[in-house]
Amino acid sequence: MRPARHPRIICSLLVLLCATLGSLSALAQSPASDWPNYGNDPGGMRYSPLTQINRENVANLRVAWTFHTGDISDGSGGRRRSGFETTPILVDGTLYFTTPFNRVIALDPETGKQLWAYDPKIDLTLDYGDGLINRGVATWLDPTRAANQPCRRRIYEDTLDARLVSIDAATGKPCEDFGNSGLVSLSKVSGYRPGWYHMTSPPAVIDDLIVVGSAIDDNQRAAMPAGVVRAFDARTGALRWSWDPIPTNPPDANATASGKQSEPQTGAANAWSIMTVDSQRDLIFIPTGSASPDYYGGLRPGDNKWANSVVALHAKTGKIAWGFQLVHHDLWDYDTAAPPLLTTLHHNGQDVPVVIQGNKTGFLYVFNRDSGAPVFPVVERRVPQSNVPGEVASPTQPFPSAPLPLSPLEISADDAWGPTAQDRETCRTGIKNLSNQGIFTPPSLQGSLIVPGNIGGITWSGYAFDPQHSLLFVNTNHLPAKIKLIPRAEYAHRESRTEDGEYSPQTGAPYGLFRRFLQSPSDMPCIAPPWGMLAAVDMAEGKIRWQVPLGGMQDFGGKQPPIPPGSINLGGPIVTAGGLVFIAGTFDPFFRAFDIETGKELWKTQLPASGHATPMTYRSASGKQFVVIAAGGHPKITEESLSDALVAFTLP
């Protein structure tokens, strides 16, 4: 045998091969990394310490598996239209998620193979205001049960038809000791009506309690169901406590004397988004929405606390620890839709436990987690007042001094935009004819310009926080809207409702409602893009580090001339120690990864439909890191195609 000519090269290759095999062996033996809550940790940071997928190799991501649920509805046949907004969780080596029809499915996280499915058989024909959607499940481990006992680990879902479900995580069978054979009715609230009162977000778990909020249709009546938050025993389903953000109005003395009782003049203020918890402090953090009806408050005078707030409740009792109202006497549908995010910031030389809370206004607030005191000063500023008979707007609203607003707070007719000259002129005229005094311009009888608009700003999409760099990653919208109040007598005549847009009765109030986003004849927004942005905010200093357009809307609604990037977006980000922000959410059907330091887009791939959901990531038992996103389109955006695909990505 002839000797090798390059023994050093061969030795080097052998060393490299051995090192590679050793790394792969160690990788294969590395423990799995779970994603046990909607936001990974109970405080909702949406941060993963995984680094296998990173800035250097993210461009190599490929589809590992795709799972089709089969649960999809285009709105025909008496059913509502579906969207797919779930964020799976991973615990004990199994992936759990919900479908738009409220089925709960368990998958093998390595292969995407179904292990079991549970179907609560909801009524798909009820008029759920948000369409057929559900954002996920929660889990609880019963420490009193042995590993082989049923329902040691439980999966919880709250459904569109107002039930709380407890399922054995191992088998998918209902836990018989919970409520009525695994089910607890959530319909026992003041003003309940099927469809109007439903659940879309996962419950929260703290100690042995399951805490649920609710979604309540906007603008149907002045007196809508109460927006109560309730805690149930995790084992039995027994009600432990209930908290109402707006207790119902006291009885009318004259009505009581005459034997006739007046109905409450408001409702809602409900917690329809994600709640977060701090077990160490025995606190659960509640984001609340607006009181009913959204755009007329003459029947609900005052600030309407605790609507449009972030509230910390003592988990054992449901009593308020502290609260802060972000919008007083809301007239704009400026819900606190984003989840509260719990973390620790190094501020003024100290480590401060905080709650970061965004609002549809585009404002970010930071509060001390123990006291509720603002970490960055909040100033009450005077705002425009209402000229609508019967309405008394709040004279001031709370403006945070830092960070700066993440969405524009005003526009003028000079800002009118459109892909054609006709579009621009139509938009310019439309803006000129509206009452327009910047953010907090109250609704009017002539029509008012609402900016940044009722989808935000910062919506339920929320944000992700990198604790290593104190960076918060936030996606925002900028889509101003026209709001008009219509006197009741006029609203009663259908021929007066000819303008294209959304009409809501606000029954019980002296005015009905018209609203629509400012759009040109081509259906594009009336203000220049970007209509959606992704931002990185240094939360220790309260400064915006970078902002970049997110996605695009080229040819949305039809063929258009070239349009700059920046799409309206619904669906949030996650961040990893690999230096990446993953986000979908845009009207274009792409999933993207951005560099946390620069905002540069490093990777994107087309999905079966737009991914209006928050992704998640995990490392399986084999050592592979996966990133998973639900891609199904949106139930209210009929221009988008629909799908039922849960898609997992990994490195080849």
Image (cartoon, helix red, strand yellow):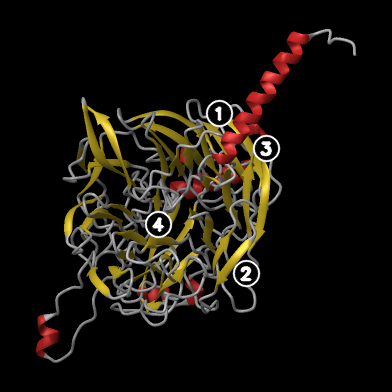
- Residue at which label 4 appears: 447
Q: Could one spot residue 338 in this view of the protein?
A: yes
What residue lies at 47% left-to-right and 33% top-to-bottom? 577
Q: Is residue 485 above or below residue 346?
A: below
- Residue at which label 3 appears: 562
**Tag 1 secondary structure:** loop
Quadrant where the image shows the C terminus: top right
Q: Which amino acid does label 4 sit on?
A: Gly
**Mark 3 → mark 4, Cα distance in angstroms:** 31 Å
Q: Residues within 10 Å of mark 4 (few under 14, many from 20)?
A: many
- Residue at which label 2 appears: 73
State which tag comes first along the sequence, 3 or 1.
3
Q: Which amino acid does label 3 sit on?
A: Pro
- Residue at which label 1 appears: 600
**Mark 4 → mark 2, Cα distance in angstroms:** 35 Å
Q: What residue type is labelled 1?
A: Lys
**Mark 1 → mark 4, Cα distance in angstroms:** 40 Å
State which tag comes first along the sequence, 2 or 3.
2
Q: Position of residue 283 (x, y in %)?
A: 23, 54
State which tag comes first along the sequence, 1 or 2.
2
User: Foreground residue, 490 or 63?
Assistant: 63
